[in-house]
Image: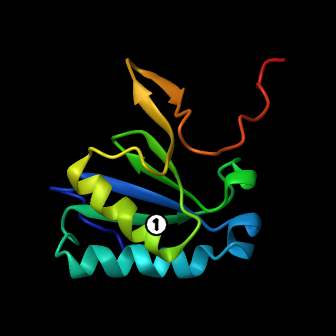
Amino acid sequence: MATWDLSGMKSHLFICNGSSCMRKGAEEITLAIRDEITQLGMDEQIHTTKTRCNGRCQDACIVIAYPQGNWYKASSTDIGREIVKDCIAQQSELHTIYRMEDGKMVLNPTVAATIGIHKNK
């Protein structure tokens, strides 16, 4: 198993490969994201990790970008590629379900996403 030197990384993309996301093309989306990173020459600045379930199965496939704190709904390989570009520009909210605002997660009302259940109710 590799131990990556993450010095100089600007973004870390966590790509859900849980069962719901896998049924909705997560493997292909993962490959497209990694290919886009390589094509843009960003391998030294954007790191990716496949994860298991991130708890947003209704919005599969989920991609989470840190340190930005954005949660994306990647429903196609093209959107996966757009997410990489967004990580670089950090300007778009086109496919962002949640974003960090004043230290809290805020739902983006312009993206069709499941609101979900509250943890404490």
Q: Is residue 60 above or below residue 25?
A: above
- In percent of the image, x 20 and y 61: which residue is there? 45
SS class of the residue under badge 1? helix
Query: Could you tell whether 56 is left or right of 46 in the image?
Result: right
Rendering coords of residue 54 (x, y %): 65, 51
Rendering coords of residue 78 (x, y %): 45, 73
The colour scheme is rainbow
- In percent of the image, x 42 and y 39: which residue is there? 69
Mark 1 highlights which residue?
79
Rendering coords of residue 105 (x, y %): 51, 27
* Viewer-side residue, 8 vs 32: 32
Q: Amino acid at mark 1?
A: Ile
Residue 55 appears in the picture as rendered:
yes
Q: Is residue 115 above or below residue 75?
A: above
Question: Could you say which quadrant of the image residue 121 lies in?
Answer: top right
Query: Could you tell whether 85 is left or right of 32 in the image?
Result: left
